[in-house]
Amino acid sequence: MSTVIDGSVSSPIMNEQELLALEQKYCSWGDTVHYLDPPKLFERAEGHYLYDREGTPYLDLQMWYSAASFGYGNQRLNQVLKDQIDKLPQLACQYLHEEKIELAAAIGRLNKSKFGLDGRVHFNVGGAQAIEDSLKIVRNSTGKNLVFAFMGGYHGRTLGASAITSSYRYRRRYGHFSDRAHFVPFPYCFRCPYDKKREDCNLYCVDQFAKNFETEYNSFWDAKAGESEFAAFYAEPIQATGGYVIPPVEYFPALKKILDERNILLVDDEIQMGFYRAGKFWAMENFNVEPDMIVFGKALTNGLNPLSGVWAREELIAPAVFPPGSTHSTFSSNPTERGVLPGADSRTATTLPESNWRHQRRGHGAANRNLP
Ligand SMILES: Cc1ncc(COP(=O)(O)O)c(C=O)c1O
């Protein structure tokens, strides 16, 4: 079969050179494809392997940056998606469908059981857009737009997400970012930013952060008003794109104590580390702190549908403060997410016992296609 566009015929049996020649001419190079020269073409994916046009298998160690954590070609998850496409594939966002409600309730109940907090879920499409939505929730609930984030942290490449992602190379061409995050050294003990050793550092990095608030002359804190100029701290629990760096287990509780004292929200970016990537449903659970907001995407649907979302504590997201229409995407609550949530064998995210999951994930690696 061939496709006709503008009178020219393209055939699926073009050879690799012909395809690359067309790509050179017609595809933007602004995405990440041209990190490799020549770009690599793949044809098929199964389990944890990608296959090129010659059928050579390539082990995907990152599993599409954790978007396909539950395996390529995962039959159960694919089937859920296929069934949903036949039943209710699309629905405009102003209407409701049970799949959206069930998924939000599953995550809400899960977080209540884990953190003891009531909250709501707000959906969008793609991680960076969910980060944008979370920034709106922060701004709306605090009236402030400055945030902390980590050096080495990655939160996406829309304009708002680029402003809180540490690498300057993602901002360099796009003008002045007046609300760029204040970047704080990540607790990378193997290469400690303060040249300390974990054995006797006493979390020196946390003390350094606390010092920001000691006097108004450090520029973060108005002691008379008892108020910080900063509204939130954006954190990946385990730094992903920045090099898969695990902080010491005591770090986040110590940081959270300071944030609570200064009335600063902790926004937990689980877009890459959530959904059991770090052994627990949320990676932050490994560190015993309760985040104020959680942003997620990627493996929520095993990458089959770019659904993403934000869970926020009730007081930050209740309809009285975050009213209808606060954000919107035509695609934001598409129905194809139902059941694709890994572990949601029937109707809730908690259906599959978590211990089971942990065992399976640790025992079989990141991407056994039979896992769910
Ligand atoms: C931690 C984290 N946050 C945000 C994003 C952005 O997500 P997306 O690429 O879906 O926009 C990513 C993507 O790699 C990520 O790893």
Image (spheres, rainbow, N blue to C red):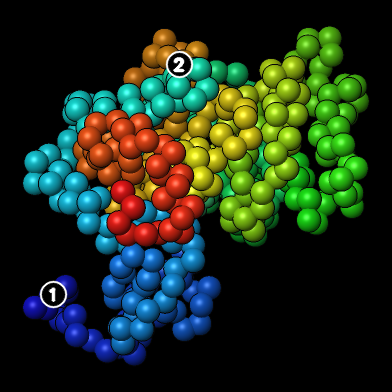
Can see residue 179? no
Query: Where residue 5 sits: x, y (%)?
Result: 16, 73
Q: Is residue 337 left or right of residue 308?
A: left
Residue 144 place in picture, x, y as percent = 63, 23
**Other residues around mark 1 within 10 Å, as few (<14) / some (14–19) / many (≥20):** few
Q: Is mark 1 within 8 Å of ligand 1?
A: no
From the viewer's perspective, is residue 111 above or below residue 285?
Answer: above
Disc number lying in front (1 or 2): 2
Tell me if the residue at label 2 has its CB under 8 Å from ligand 1. Answer: no
Quote the CA–CA distance across marks 1 and 2. Answer: 51 Å
Residue occupying the point 75% across, 50% down: 188
Identified at 75% across, 29% down, the residue is 254
- Report whether 293 appears left or right of 261: left
Q: Residue 53 or 76: which is nearer the viewer?
A: 76
Residue 135, image quadrant: top right
Which quadrant of the rendered structure holds the N terminus? bottom left
Earlier-in-chain disc, 1 versus 2 = 1
Residue 18 picture quarter: bottom left
The amino acid on which the numbered mark 2 sits, given as a three-letter code, is Asp
- Residue under pointer 2: 118
Q: Is residue 127 left or right of residue 182?
A: left
Q: What secondary structure is found at the residue carrying circle 1?
A: strand
Label 2 element class: loop
Q: Which mark is residue 165?
A: none
Q: Residue at x 83, y 37 (%)?
A: 203
Amino acid on which the number 1 mark rests in the picture: Thr
* Residue 3: numbered disc: 1
